[in-house]
Image (tube, rainbow, N blue to C red):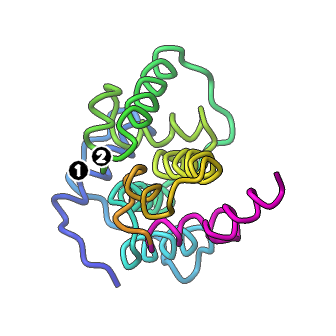
């Protein structure tokens, strides 16, 4: 069970629902759906819970939270019309994240950079790149890690270079993404050359 501050929850609900419902301005809307009876909401809650209890980035937990609240009130739309201004802003956010690869990014800061609400940024980023910001960033880190490992850098140096908290943190994410450890990947690549 999660306990949330209703004032803060109201802000987040307004962020999400004002994008979907014209003129929405309530302070707080009670949750009408039961997590146990809706598999879509249940899936989002489990993702949120796992992000909160695991060794994850704040950005990942924030995105999971917005996805959960959205699922409680609205089913994701399947068709969206392109908006070139939003696309340019999302590209700027992506470039900022890639330029500051080792930084811990906060959803508020990225949304401000894009000139969008946090919710709008998550949706636009997912629409543009197929992934939310935290997943895109982790994908990029793993891609760069593969290059550095092939160049012969030590695993601990790769972890530090890419902004992981420690070598174990790096290894967990690397193995989760590629199903092999960095050491195995590095030795396999050297043996294959």
Left or right of residue 23: residue 90? right
- In the image, is residue 151 above or below residue 44? above
Q: Residue at x 44, y 35 (%)?
A: 98
Q: Is residue 108 magenta?
A: no
Q: Residue at x 42, y 57 (%)?
A: 157
**Residue 34: horizontal and vertical position, in percent?**
48, 77
Q: Is residue 190 visible?
A: yes
- Segment colored magenta: 168-193
Q: Is residue 69 visible?
A: no
> What is the crowding at mark 2: few (fewer than 14 residues within 10 Å), some, or many (at least 20)?
many
- In the image, is residue 97 above or below residue 48? above
Residue position for label 1: 11
- 153 and 27: which is toward the camera: 153
> What is the crowding at mark 1: few (fewer than 14 residues within 10 Å), some, or many (at least 20)?
some
Residue placed farthest to the top in the image? 84
**Residue 59: horizontal and vertical position, in percent?**
36, 54
Q: Residue 114 is drawn in which quadrant?
A: top left
**Residue 15: horizontal and vertical position, in percent?**
32, 43
- Indicate the secondary structure of the residue bearing disc 1: helix
CB-based contact (under 8 Å), mark 2 and mark 1: yes
Residue position for label 2: 14
Q: Residue 51 is drawn in which quadrant?
A: bottom left
- 66 and 187: which is toward the camera: 187
């Amino acid at each position: 069970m999660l306990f949330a501050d209703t004032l803060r929850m109201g802000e987040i609900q307004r962020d999400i629902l004002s994008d979907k419902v014209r003129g929405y301005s309530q302070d707080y809307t009670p949750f009408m759906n039961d997590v146990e009876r809706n598999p879509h909401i249940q899936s989002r809650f489990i993702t949120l819970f796992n992000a909160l209890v695991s060794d994850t980035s704040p950005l990942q937990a924030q995105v999971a939270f917005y996805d959960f609240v959205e699922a409680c009130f609205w089913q994701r739309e399947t068709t969206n019309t392109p908006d070139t201004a939003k696309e340019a802003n999302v590209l700027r956010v992506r470039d900022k994240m890639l330029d500051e690869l080792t930084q811990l990014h906060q959803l508020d800061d990225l949304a401000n950079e894009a000139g969008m609400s946090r919710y709008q940024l998550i949706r636009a980023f997912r629409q543009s790149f197929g992934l939310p910001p935290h997943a895109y960033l982790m994908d990029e880190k793993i891609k760069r890690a593969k290059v550095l490992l092939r160049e012969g850098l030590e695993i601990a140096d790769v972890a530090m270079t890419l902004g992981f908290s420690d070598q174990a943190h790096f290894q967990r994410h690397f193995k989760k993404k590629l199903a092999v450890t960095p050491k195995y990947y590095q030795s396999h690549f050297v043996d294959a050359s």
